[in-house]
Image (cartoon, rainbow, N blue to C red):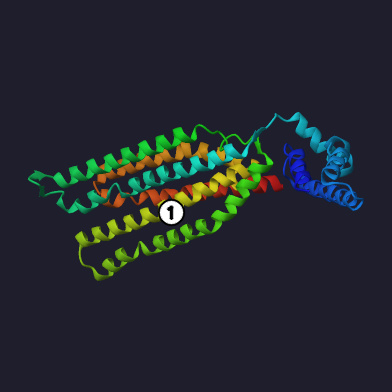
Amino acid sequence: METIKTYLENMFMNLPKNREVLHAKEELLNMMEDKYLELKNEGRTENEAVGIVISEFGNLNEVAEELGLTQTMKDASEAPDKRVIPSELARDFVTNRIRASYKVGIGVVLTIWSPLLLILLSDTENQEFFGIRNGGTALGLVVLLSMVAMAVGLFIMSGVESGRYDLEKNGNFTLDYQAESYVKIEEERYRMVKMTKITIGVVLYILSAVPLLVLGILDIGDNIMNIGVVVLLLIVGAAVYLFITAGMKQSAYDILLKKGEYSDEGRVLARKTETIGSVYWPIIVIIYLYWSFTSGNWGFTWIIWPLAGLLFAAIIGLVGLLRSRSKME
């Protein structure tokens, strides 16, 4: 019977996984199972029963009209041929995505932590540091730029490695039966690990403001408040690392199964997001650098990044909402 199920999966491999097709697939499976059991009850061997079932129901063109798939199959035949992703390639893709998540996670953490030394040494701006006037600010800027440079290097390495696959941007593919089973099983196994990472990350994110709030209430002094900001960024960096590594591994499964933002509808929105982001983020960088250099208050201007992230998310959410409403109309 397992042979029949595998054969059925291959029959429907190139058809869209919409409600109509899934219903027809289930109906055909029931028909094949009934015939298989009937043949077994007649005393046929396993191989005989499977062979007869496949010969009778194995040609989808012959049963398409009965299943209501005539138009669907016609559309599928006229569409560009899809790549078939085997299980080995699916495994490689998931492994590559996990490695990339570590590089991206570390890169983002380096970016978040890059101003830490500058914040700690900000009170030495007009004082000598190791015998050098404004040496603390200079050292802090050097460390900041060095950490950002390392982060950019990690982002580039991650992009080059991921560039071997184009599944994320090109959705013209389908998984074979073994690959689809593997991805679904691995996604289910990962569910609890992902939720644990996200839970810990959310808790850290909430707790990150506690030291700063406590020091603010105690009103100890600006120098001590800087330490509170440093602790906040350290904790936020750890939380963000958990979010990124959890999310990128899950995205590997979503890409292969074409779920969420990687569905056909989601890919359209993603292209719009990329277009908006290509204009939005360079503007934010210009604003950040101008504000920081003109004010000299590098210990505060970093706040533009979380605020810009929230605003960007709101813009993309609004675009998605407007698109959904236009489709409904």
- Taking the spot 51% from the left edge, 47% from the top edge, the residue there is 249
Question: Going by the image, does 101 lie left or right of 93?
Answer: left
The furthest residue to the bottom: 218
Residue 99: give x, y in percent of width and height.
45, 42
Left or right placement of residue 310 versus residue 122 in this view: right
The residue nearer to you, when weighing 98 against 213, is 98
Indicate the secondary structure of the residue bearing disc 1.
helix
**Mark 1 nearby-residue class (10 Å; few <14, some 14–19, many ≥20):** many
- Label total for image: 1
Question: Residue 206, can we see it?
Answer: yes
**Residue that numbered label 1 is attached to:** 242
Nearer to me, 72 or 268: 72
In the image, residue 187 sits, relative to residue 85, either above or below, namely below
Above or below, 82 against 237 in this view is above
Q: Measuring 59% from the left and 46% from the top, which residue is drawn there?
A: 254
Tell me if I can see residue 263 in this picture: no
Q: Amino acid at mark 1?
A: Leu
Quarter of the view holding residue 215: bottom left
Q: Which of these two is toward me, 237 or 9?
A: 9
Task: Measuring from the top left, give residue 128's x and y in whole percent.
Answer: 9, 48
At horizontal 28% and vertical 56% (from top left) the residue drawn is 230
In percent of width and height, residue 251 lies at 54, 46
Specify the farthest residue to the left: 131
Give the residue drawn at x 73%, y 40%.
16
